Image (cartoon, rainbow, N blue to C red):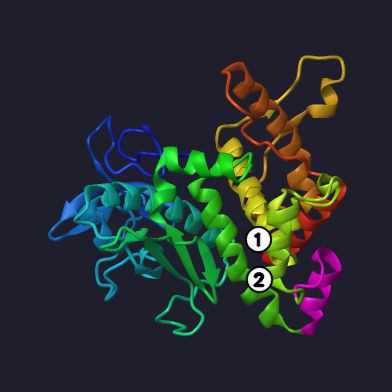
């Protein structure tokens, strides 16, 4: 993600900021110009310093501090380009649900930032009632007898369900440990699940030639999915899984391999853009430091090929993992990218472009 600044005073801003702490201006994000911009009131609308000539209004979810995106003041839509994909939100009369939903929305908006920059097809349920992208944010239900109905996070023909408990840091860490996952975040969930949606749109619906390319790279998705998952949970990944897969879960089935690789491609593009915005250069002060040099001086969303991304990504991950270890924290990026995995990431690059 890029680095933003207040047009009024130059203060650095985060994507999620709603008020400039330096000059006090109200802030909002305008996706059409990719700016978190300072705002000034004009009647019942807002004038954006970073996008003059158009009056804006806030997404309706800004009323509950769950969104800071803007849309044209004369738009008939009450919700922004990200929030109009919501189908179900949790009961907001519950303060815990409200806090968790805000975290979910923060991660979801981060996802939409990247998807919009990559110009991916983003029909919602109004545009495509049968297969448009939509989100259900649900919580586990307990009946009168104390029986719990657990909500499973997953994807079904464009509908992505997220258990709001994933927004609880302690609960998510418990699940990460139970599932033996080195990495589990809200944003990671969104990137993974939306990968299933884009498999439908960019692979399945693109015809037999597209499916053939997919099967050559990831395997035959026609293998029984339920049985494949059961085998994975019973037996775990093969001993040599790191030679061909980015994660253990990717070994379960070709669909999961695609979704895991898709998520990692988005991780790479977004993080490299952040590194570029901060002008980061990697110049290790060791004898063979030249082998780990990197400088992200291009827009990762418009990279020519996967090699441009990986040549910068690997040195950056070595550096940030070393920084984390210096703070006594686990590796920020606890993954190994084998040649086979890099080839799969190259497939994702070609697919998104």
> What residue do we see at 66% from left, 50% from top?
264
Residue 234 lies in magenta, yes or no?
Answer: no
Residue bearing mark 1:
259
Secondary structure under the numbered disc 1 in the rendered image:
helix
Mark 2 vs mark 1, CA separation in Å: 8 Å
Q: Nearer the viewer, residue 276 or 78?
A: 78
Q: Residues within 10 Å of mark 2 (few under 14, many from 20)?
A: some
Q: In the rendering, at what x and y percent does residue 118 appear?
A: 59, 61
Q: Nearer the viewer, residue 92 or 217?
A: 92
Q: Measured along the vertical axis of the image, is residue 311 above or below residue 89?
A: above
- In the figure, is residue 2 to the left or right of 138? right
Q: In the rendering, at what x and y percent does residue 97 appear?
A: 29, 52
Visible residue check, residue 58: no
Q: Measured along the vertical axis of the image, is residue 301 above or below residue 338?
A: below
Q: Nearer the viewer, residue 254 or 112?
A: 254
- Tell me the magenta residue range: 208-221
Visible residue check, residue 236: yes
Q: Measured along the vertical axis of the image, is residue 298 above or below residue 205?
A: above
Q: In the rendering, at what x and y percent does residue 117 appear?
A: 55, 58
Answer with mark 2 or mark 1, whichever residue precedes in sequence: 2
Q: Measured along the vertical axis of the image, is residue 270 above or below residue 87?
A: above
> What residue do we see at 29% from left, 63% from top?
143
Q: Are marks 2 and 1 in contact (CB under 8 Å)?
A: yes
Secondary structure under the numbered disc 2 in the rendered image:
helix
- In the figure, is residue 207 to the left or right of 123? right
Residue bearing mark 2:
199
Residue 209 lies in magenta, yes or no?
Answer: yes
Figure quadrant of the C terminus: bottom right
Q: Quadrant of residue 156?
A: bottom right
> What residue do we see at 66% from left, 74% from top?
202
Q: Quadrant of residue 24?
A: top left
Secondary structure character of the magenta stretch overall: helix
């Amino acid at each position: 993600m890029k680095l933003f600044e207040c047009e009024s005073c130059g203060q650095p801003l985060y994507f999620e900021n709603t008020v400039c702490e330096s000059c006090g201006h109200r802030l909002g994000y305008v996706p059409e110009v990719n700016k978190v911009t300072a705002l000034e009131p004009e009647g019942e609308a807002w004038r954006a310093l970073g996008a003059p000539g158009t009056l804006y209004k806030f997404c309706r979810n800004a009323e509950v501090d769950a969104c800071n995106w803007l849309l044209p003041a004369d738009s008939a839509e009450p919700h922004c380009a990200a929030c109009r994909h919501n189908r179900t939100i949790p009961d907001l009369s519950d303060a815990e649900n409200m806090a968790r939903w805000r975290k979910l929305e923060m991660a979801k908006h981060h996802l939409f930032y990247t998807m919009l920059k990559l110009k991916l097809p983003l029909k919602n349920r109004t545009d495509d009632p049968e297969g448009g992208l939509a989100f259900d944010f649900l919580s586990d239900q307990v009946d009168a007898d104390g029986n719990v109905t657990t909500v499973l996070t997953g994807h079904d023909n464009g509908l992505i369900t997220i258990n709001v408990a994933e927004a609880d840091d302690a609960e998510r860490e418990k699940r990460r440990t139970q599932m033996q996952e080195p990495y589990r975040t809200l944003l990671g969930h969104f990137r993974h699940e939306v990968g299933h949606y884009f498999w439908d749109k960019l692979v399945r619906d693109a015809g037999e030639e597209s499916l053939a390319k997919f099967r050559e790279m990831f395997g035959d998705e026609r293998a029984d999915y339920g049985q494949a998952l059961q085998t994975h949970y019973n037996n775990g990944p093969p001993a040599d899984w790191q030679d061909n897969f980015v994660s253990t879960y990717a070994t379960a089935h070709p669909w999961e391999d695609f979704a895991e690789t898709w998520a990692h491609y988005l991780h790479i593009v977004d993080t490299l853009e952040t590194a570029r915005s901060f002008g980061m250069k990697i110049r290790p002060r060791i004898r063979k430091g030249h082998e780990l040099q990197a400088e992200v001086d291009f827009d990762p969303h418009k990279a020519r090929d996967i090699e441009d991304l990986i040549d910068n990504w690997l040195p950056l991950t070595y550096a940030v993992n070393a920084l984390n270890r210096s703070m006594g924290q686990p590796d920020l990026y606890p993954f190994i990218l084998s040649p086979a995995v890099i080839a799969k990431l190259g497939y994702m690059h070609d697919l998104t472009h």
